[in-house]
Image (cartoon, rainbow, N blue to C red):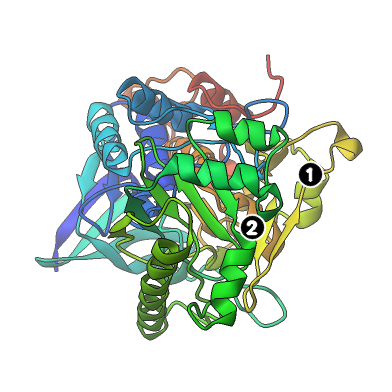
Amino acid sequence: MTGDRDYDVIVVGGGSSGVAAALGAARTAPGGRVLLIERYGFLGGTLTAALVAPMMTFHSPKEQVIRGIAQEIVDILMARGMSPGHVYDTTGYVPTVTPFDAEALKEVELELLGAAGVDLLLHSQVVGADVQGHRLCSITVQGKEGQSRFSAKSFVDATGDGDLAYYAGVDYEFGRPADNLPQPATLKFKMINVDIEAVKNYAAAHPGEFRLGERGVKGLLEARHISICGFFSLLEEAKRKGEINLLRDQVLFFSTPFPGEVIVNMSRVANLKDLSSATLTKAEIEARRQVHELVAFMQRRLPGFAAARLVATGAQIGLRESRRIKGLYRLSAEDVLSGRTFADQIACNAYPIDIHSPDGAGVVTMRINEGKSGRAYYGIPYRCLLNAQVENLLVTGRAISTTHEAHASTRLAPVCMAVGQAAGVGAAMAAGYCGRSGTAAKATERRKPMAAAEVDVAELQRTLMAQGAELGLDMA
């Protein structure tokens, strides 16, 4: 094992939440040492490795509720012609979706981290944690050269699966309470040469075969970037004839920023009992079998797909749900649906509860009841990122502390970015850096490192707002 390397903040996981966490930490602690560790040779997490697209959603039916680093990334992509920005969701499931080019996202995130002075270590995976008392002192990272140890004052687990928290002994939950089964996993894939106009024309002639937004067929025909949920009868006929064998009741795909290119979200691997390599191997094999069937079905039966071609599958299957830590607060379905806000909230979200059945084909959707609060969004408290076992470890992304139901709302990329930014700022402040001013105190004036729960939440919130984040709070 190589020698120790010491940092102020270490973020493990370079996905949506991890990149935002590293940037939030670095911008709160200029001159400090921030390290981001990622297992792949690129950044972006599920948005790049698993081809999850589009981003959904930055908006409630009334307003934009996610900004900050997440919006900054979208703005850069738009300026480069690699995203149209937030566009109308033609299925009506959410107010807006945000198509983007995954390759451009990788580039943008590398540039932002470099400009912020973040140290980056790719091709490396955390495999152990040294906890003394209630503090995480160091982590063990496996790379091609062997194992290395890294220490820090504060740590952020942005692995998505709560891997670092698991190694550090933090209590967690997995799946739904009845049988511990998580939502099914999906391997997304990209097709080109799709005749989008043929898809639109078929939908216009068979509107009952599609879920359409409030603008109806007209909105679909006018849209430059489309979301499609439908072809119900064609899919059912193919299933009856044995052409497809999977638990899906709808064709679901989304256009990218480029003409004739779509991302398909249809494969479904259920009954995942754990995160073992054996379980995930079986899931990957089954998902790729399903993709092969789906591509053939789409080319054979769907209008607009006769000349379409498969050009990419995700580097890994996309997991909707895995470990969720048992935090200082557990966000519930009631919190989400009632539009609850919290004194310590560090992010907002408006995505509905969207539970894909862990053992079936259906999807259960529950939406925020604006009548109860007058809000079309809810808040996520800082306490959901904290735990009782390890005081200097914050958890972000889909592994934050929620119930199975609430998780089905908090697992989406935009809110993971928002929560990640907060985790990074909180970690930097716990490492002894000041907040809103955006400058580090002089060495003689630096505060001592503290527990993440001891961070001044009001100052954390003001710092996030100074960094452009939307908290749904009115703070002078």
Write down the quadrant of residue 151 in the picture. bottom left
Image coordinates for residue 9, horizontal then vertical, percent: 35, 44
* Residue at mark 1: 368
In the rendered image, the residue lying farthest to the right is 372
In the rendered image, the residue lying farthest to the top is 476
Left or right side of 73 for 268: right
**Amino acid type, label 1:** Ile
Give the vertical position of 244 relative to 9 (above or below).
below
Give the vertical position of 309 relative to 267 (above or below).
above
- What separation in Å lies between label 2 and label 1 (alpha carbons)? 13 Å
The answer to the question of whether label 2 and label 1 lie on touching residues, with beta carbons closer than 8 A, is no
Left or right side of 384 for 272: left
Q: Name the residue: 63% across, 58% down.
A: 407
Instruction: Kindly tell me whether residue 450 is visible in this rendering.
Output: no
* Residue at mark 2: 408
Q: Name the residue: 55% across, 60% down.
A: 251
Q: Say what secondary structure mark 1 lies in.
A: loop
Give the vertical position of 382 relative to 277 (above or below).
above
How packed mark 2 is, by other alpha carbons closer than 10 Å (few <14, some 14-19, many 20 or more), is: many
Instruction: Kindly tell me whether residue 407 is visible in this rendering.
Output: yes
In the rendered image, the residue lying farthest to the front is 205
Write down the quadrant of residue 340 in the picture. top right
- Pointer 2 or 1: first along the chain: 1
